[in-house]
Image (spheres, rainbow, N blue to C red):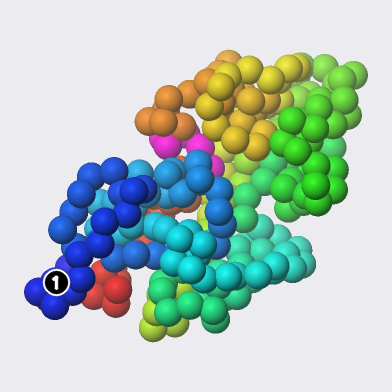
Amino acid sequence: MIYSPLMPKVSVKHCFQRIDYMTEFVIATNNEKKLIEINRILKPLSICAVTAKEKGINLGDVEENGLTFAQNAYIKASSAASKCDYAVIADDSGLCVDALDGRPGIYSARYGGDNCSSDKQIQMLLDELKNVEEEKRGAHFTCSICCILKNGRVIKVEDYCYGSIAYEPFGNGGFGYDPIFLVNGKSFASLSDEEKDAQSHRGKALRKLKDELSKYTEEF
């Protein structure tokens, strides 16, 4: 990337290693943990992800009426891009449980209703699976990411992580369904940042995004 001396210096609290010239991308979420995860992986490209709220931009409510994760990610990204002058990143991700025919799937974040807490969502899922044997508790996470650059270029990536559902939550990290999603006997909520980045659906999708973005650095 070639930088002009006229480009402004920015300092954002979520950028873990100060780089003199950062390019800010707005993400279509206010999820603090997701923001940190995105910045960990994209910072080698001198990208610093910030929320729309931090930039004083009101994204409003977006109706996620897509039939796939990829469609929902694009809906969120295109809506955000229409309301700001930044490159934007949006993702849609969810948990698909084999014994429930893929539910909650794209409705993962809305499982149990709009105001249902993560703890209640987890308990609802565990209740649905209480009579399911261990060998039939397979599941996978999907993450679709859509990035729209300021010049309108659209970049889409997707990846997965396969595992199983625990009988009860454990681990203090992560968010969402992480405490009950097991990979090699460990829940996502019990993994270190490095372990999760290496194994998770979002970590793998973000590395794909990083590889794609590296082809277009002159565009941002």
Q: Is residue 67 left or right of residue 35?
A: right
Looking at this view, name the residue that lies furthest to the left: 5
Q: Name the residue under label 1.
A: 3
27 falls in the magenta region? no
Q: Can residue 89 be seen in this view?
A: no
Q: Is the magenta stretch mostly helix, strand or loop?
A: helix
Q: How many marks?
A: 1
Position of residue 172 measured from the top left corner of the image (x, y, whole percent): 56, 22
Image point 70% across, 60% down: which residue?
A: 68
Query: Could you say which is closer to the camera, residue 137 or residue 93?
Result: 93
Part of the protein shown in magenta = 197-201
Q: In this view, does 49 lie to the left or right of 163?
A: left
Query: Could you say which is closer to the camera, residue 209 or residue 177?
Result: 177
Q: Is mark 1 on a helix, strand or loop?
A: loop
198 falls in the magenta region? yes
Residue type at numbered disc 1:
Tyr
Give the quadrant of the N terminus: bottom left
Image point 50% across, 65% down: which residue?
A: 52
In the rendered image, the vertical position of residue 169 relative to residue 141, given as above or below = above
